[in-house]
Image (cartoon, rainbow, N blue to C red):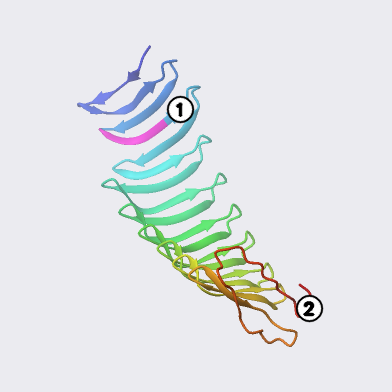
Amino acid sequence: NIDEKEYFLEGEYHGPQKYYYANGKINKIITFDKGIETRIQKFDTTGKQIFEYRMKPGAENAITEVSALGKKSMTYHFDRNYMQGEKIVFLPNGKVMTAMRYINGGLDSVYTGYYPNGQIRAQGHYVQGSRQGRWTYFTPDGKITSVNYYLNDDSHGTDTVYYENGAIEIIAPYRSDDRHGWFCKYAPGGELMYKYHYRHRFLVGYTYEQADGTLIKEIPVENSEKAVVIKNYYKNGKK
């Protein structure tokens, strides 16, 4: 059986170089232009193409990946073995799924992720590969579901979660990925349901509104590493 077919021009690879499986089916095709790779095609053992890389002539570090369906799935760049510049990932329908930028192989840019309908799914910032600062998450119809804050990929800051009607559902403060401060839960109509007090991830107390709208004095919680039963009441006295 033939293992490979190679072609040369003036001592350099030139044209499609073909490599075969033991069953005679094509394994991969690497196309060169005077020694420079311009295209890589990979196939499974039945002969079906799995993916394809396309490099621009004269700019071998600009790469386009193509799916088995022949659709463009990804574009990105390499420079001295590091991913550099913009990387775009595409959905099967051709719309952008994510867009981000790399510096020396690490994510370092504004990140934007999309739903198939084109609406933004998430938006935030990476610094040297870690989420930093404010990140905002959306529903497929464009409503904000939450605003989160990060420091080196850890939750750090006050996160806010929203109901579908836009009202605040939860306010959750974090420090170095631990809950720290007053964790507040609200009803869809805006009424405060309860407040839990955390200190370095441990629950140390809680409170809730009385019928007159005032908060009861904080009720301490001892040894919150064990299971704790907390009873919360609505203003009408119901649990």
Judged by its main secondary structure, the magenta piece is strand
Task: Point out residue 119 in the picture as x, y percentages from the top left corner.
Answer: 58, 59
Assign the C terminus to one quadrant of the image: bottom right
Quadrant position of residue 236: bottom right
Mark 2 nearby-residue class (10 Å; few <14, some 14–19, many ≥20): few
Query: Quadrant where the N terminus lies?
Result: top left
- Residue 218 is situated, as x and y percent measured from the top left of the image, at 61, 81
Marks 2 and 1, the one that precedes in the sequence? 1
Q: Which residue is mark 2?
A: 237
Q: Residue at x 25, y 24 (%)?
A: 8
Q: Residue at x 75, y 77 (%)?
A: 234
Q: Amino acid at mark 1?
A: Phe
| Neighbours of disc 1 within 10 Å: few (<14), some (14-19), many (20+) | some
- What residue is pinned by disc 1? 43
SS at badge 2:
loop
Does the magenta portion include 38? yes
Question: Quick check: 63 above or below 2?
Answer: below
Question: Is residue 190 left or right of 72 when viewed as pictured?
Answer: right
Q: Position of residue 57 (x, y in %)?
A: 32, 40
* Range shown magenta: 35-41
Mark 1 lies on a secondary structure that is strand
Instruction: Report the front residue among 227 and 11.
Output: 227
Q: Amino acid at mark 2?
A: Gly
